[in-house]
Amino acid sequence: MENVIEISNLTKNYSSFTLNNVSFTVPKGCIMGLIGANGAGKSTTIKLMLNITRRNEGSVKIFGQDALENEEHIKQNIGVVFDESHFHDTLKASQICKIMSNVYKEWDNELFYQYLKRFKLPVDKKVKTYSRGMKMKLSIAVALSHNPKLLILDEPTSGLDPIVRNEILDIFLEFIEDEEHSILLSSHITSDLERIADYITLINHGEVIFSESKDDLIYNYGIFKGTNHQMKEINKQDFIGIRHTQFGFEALAKDCRKMAAKYPELIHDTAGIEDIMVFFVRGEE
Ligand SMILES: Nc1ncnc2c1ncn2[C@@H]1O[C@H](COP(=O)(O)OP(=O)(O)OP(=O)(O)O)[C@@H](O)[C@H]1O
């Protein structure tokens, strides 16, 4: 499968944080969800990809091209959304439209106005009168209106109500429908990713813990539960993390079926993306 993004050994050294040898790929036509705790390195990864921050080492290829050497061409073909609106408060959507038509060769006025209508955004009101959700929708409308092939989104649904979030997730799914368009998005809202992502990359303390298909993750991983007495009987190496609960313990296993055969006395269930992330990040308490 063709990759739209190829990140290899991306490294950034800050005084108190290192993004260390981050590598992962995003196949064309897919949605990749980037997850991790606060400060794990998700935004740093995105900023390095976009050359907003200078990397120390590693390479980034987007559309098969080096992201530093072909920055101008690549940026014409991607839509970017950060979790805060970057439009000046005094601008109106109609003025943003004019500005963007000078920035992007493929800017489509008609498409932009269609999104404004769809998102119920007033054309002639200043951005400062917009709510947070409206600002986010405006950013997404702008990101989509120059017909990009790839969207790179840093927490695009944070702080939005479930109705707006759902509306935005539907647009993302429509965007990749033709299998020619792709999305990389970071999010703390694992239920959003469970709904739309094809792949999940977990970053912890600046390192990639895994980058896998969501269906494989949900199929393979499992949560096991047992009593305090049963906890003494298990081999802790068989589990990624173990946490104490009111009734005993809960543990995450990477190969649910194998562990279910080895520990038939334990109750097990499928693990969600949030469970997997929490166990990997917290490990054994
Ligand atoms: N310009 C900078 N100078 C120094 N340290 C920085 C800089 N930018 C980010 N960092 C540090 O890099 C680390 C990772 O930050 P980053 O914003 O990438 O995390 P994140 O995973 O996006 O977190 P969150 O989920 O909270 O948005 C943090 O410890 C942060 O303090």
Image (spheres, rainbow, N blue to C red):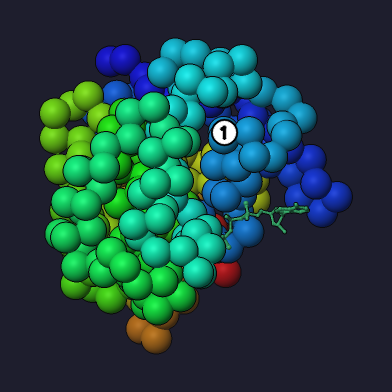
Res 79 quadrant in image? top left
Say left or right for 61 vs 166. Answer: right
Extreme residue toward the right, this view: 15
Q: Mark 1 is on which residue type?
A: Met
Relative to 46, is 132 above or below?
Answer: below
The front one of 123 and 114 is: 123
**Residue 176, percent across and down?**
20, 35
Say left or right for 124 vs 67. Answer: left
**Residue 173, percent across and down?**
18, 45
Disc 1 within 8 angstroms of ligand 1 (CB): no
| Residue occupying image coordinates x 55% and y 16% | 70
| Residue occupying image coordinates x 31% and y 61% | 137
The residue identified by callout 1 is 49
**Residue 75, percent across and down?**
48, 29
Relative to 130, is 282 above or below?
Answer: above
Q: Find ligand 1 in the image and state its quadrant.
A: bottom right
**Residue 181, percent across and down?**
26, 30
Say left or right for 1 vs 96. Answer: left
- Quick check: can you spot residue 257? no
Res 51 quadrant in image? top right
Relative to 51, is 112 above or below?
Answer: below
| Residue occupying image coordinates x 40% and y 55% | 95
